[in-house]
Image: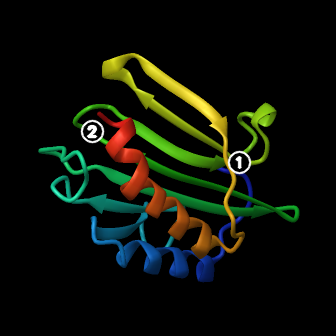
Amino acid sequence: MGLPGVTDSSTYEGLKDVLQRQPEVTSVNYEPNSISKRFLRATIDPNRVSPSTGPEPPALDVEWRYADGDTYYRIHYFDPNTGFNCGWHRDEDHPELGPVHFQSEHPEMGKSDHKSAHFSKSAPTEVLWEAVEQLFEELLPTLSG
């Protein structure tokens, strides 16, 4: 991780609350610690995702920054069992795709993809809620297998 800008403690408190409400999530921690709060890491129960994975728990990292009036974020899921990872990034990595892009990579299958993405809301907690809903209900069952 490593987006430009600064964090906002109140934003991270709201994001942590959203993650703790997800049935797939078993724990949420500030990384590297509760003082530095560079990003949040949610540990996922491998038996609560479809298709189930394991034995190592997947994780969802959330980083949110503000710089010069712009918002940057990464909401990124990764499964250490398969190497599959995907997420939404609002950063400067793929300007040709617009301000937000979705990327996925499945090394075991030799697949990777980047495409433009958009959220219907703009508040950090609402964006995260929409992303995790898409992730667990729509994307993982089709992309990770």
**Mark closer to the observer (1, 2):** 1
Looking at the rendered image, the quarter that the C terminus falls into is top left
- Front residue of 13 and 48: 48
Q: Residue at x 35, y 70 (%)?
A: 28
Residue 57 x, y percent position in the rendering: 22, 51
Which residue corresponds to mark 2?
A: 80
Dot 1 or dot 2: first in sequence order is 2
Which residue corresponds to mark 1?
A: 100
Given the image, on which type of amino acid does mark 1 rest?
A: Val
Mark yes or no: residue 66 visible: yes
Characterize the local packing of mark 2: few (<14), some (14-19) or many (20 or more) Cα atoms within 10 angstroms: some
Residue 23 position (above or below residue 76): below
Residue 72 position (above or below residue 18): above
Residue 122 sits in quarter: bottom right
Give the left or right position of residue 125, taking residue 136 as reference.
right
Q: Residue at x 45, y 63 (%)?
A: 133
Characterize the local packing of mark 1: few (<14), some (14-19) or many (20 or more) Cα atoms within 10 angstroms: many
Given the image, on which type of amino acid does mark 2 rest?
A: Pro
Give the left or right position of residue 56, taking residue 111 as reference.
left
Residue 82 sits in quarter: top left
Residue 1 x, y percent position in the rendering: 55, 47
Count of labels shown? Answer: 2
Residue 101 position (above or below residue 118): above
Residue 17 x, y percent position in the rendering: 44, 81
Residue 56 x, y percent position in the rendering: 17, 46
